[in-house]
Image: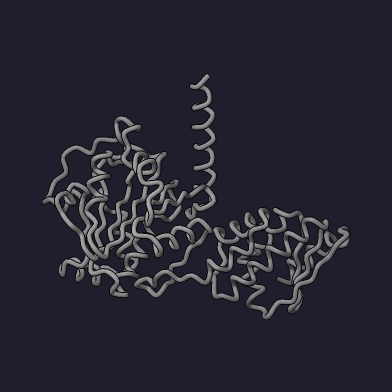
Amino acid sequence: MKACVEGRIGFLKEHNLEKSIVLENASAAAELFGSFDVHAKRIEKTFDVALSCRDSQLKISGEEAGVAQAARTVESLLGLIAKGEALNDQNVGYCIDMVREDREAQMMPLAEDCICITAKGKPVKPKTVGQKAYCDNIRKNTVTIGVGPAGTGKTYLAVAMAVTAFRAQQVNRIILTRPAVEAGEKLGFLPGDLQQKVDPYLRPLYDALFDMLGAETYQKYVERGNIEVAPLAYMRGRTLEKAFIILDEAQNTLPAQMKMFLTRMGVGSKMIVNGDLSQIDLPNKKESGLIQAAEVLGKLDNVAFVQFTGEDVVRHPLVKDIVAAYDKWDKKHAAGKTK
């Protein structure tokens, strides 16, 4: 860090405003700057400022507007560090975006909301305001429908909420399902028994469950009938009581399938329906049951709709840019067709 400070001395003298922030300890400074000062450099580049740290004092130098925003970003990040959060590309970038929108006060509730603890002892928390709203709506409502692009954590958070409800004995079973529709390619004949045939379609659900419970615990609950992972077709004719039921990839359901699924709910159950309207794999995209459900159920009590956006993408930072680029392309070509 000493070399980092010395390399910026000349740069600091050219600026007309300097703000100091007192750090609690050296470890907070190290976490804030990041490995090879990666977080500090990102803040500097974004707000056109310079950061330096000597002993327990952090100095921010630059133009007034940039210094003010950089200081708010630093203070928000220090708040996350104080809550035990590890800084990474995702939450640093998200914090910067929130500061630009004067919404950084919404960051702290994210760090305070622990949804679930994974099998490896890692806390699962919402990483964006959209994810926080999604989890809050699941807690409050009987049916929650989450719609948004890939990488927004819909499936993972839904499974985390289901495991939490199961551990708290609020439900007796976790049931996860999705339609068996190929993503734009024909897979042909699949060998093996029925479970082996449907496993490829259900892999994202398995991955989330393994992360939350561990493979051995998951297998134990499956054998006891506490956890069921099955294709949507297997839901017909059933009444699912005191169960936490998740329908994934709901954009690939037909209207009749969506109605069939929603009417399976019994006493003491919760349902989550997740989908991405930009990834409809049906021959006729207008026939998606998810589209119809948004129109039919919009005004019902105990039914909540949560719309995720590109801001809620928590995968690799490039995924957010990819989603935004495709959205821009779709809007441009949609506008061209209407002319």
* Residue 46: % across, % down: 70, 53
Q: Looking at the rendering, which quadrant does residue 269 occupy?
A: bottom left
Total tally of numbered discs in the picture: 0
* Residue 250: % across, % down: 32, 46
Front one among 171 and 193: 171
Outermost residue, top direction? 339
User: Residue at horizontal 51%, vertical 61%?
Assistant: 127
292 with respect to 28 (left or right)? left
User: Residue at horizontal 78%, vertical 60%?
Assistant: 67
* Residue 42: % across, % down: 66, 57
For the question of whether residue 114 can be seen, the reply is: yes
For the question of whether residue 197 can be seen, the reply is: no
Q: What is the quadrant of the N terminus in the image?
A: bottom right
User: Residue at horizontal 40%, vertical 44%?
Assistant: 276
Front one among 58 and 155: 155
* Residue 291: % across, % down: 37, 39
9 with respect to 185 (left or right)? right
Measured along the vertical axis of the image, is residue 221 above or below residue 131? below
User: Residue at horizontal 66%, vertical 53%?
Assistant: 101
Measured along the vertical axis of the image, is residue 40 above or below residue 323? below
321 with respect to 258 (left or right)? right
Front one among 59 and 13: 59
Q: How is the rendered protein coloured? A: one colour
Front one among 25 and 137: 137
Outermost residue, bottom direction? 25
Q: Looking at the rendering, which quadrant does residue 49 occupy?
A: bottom right
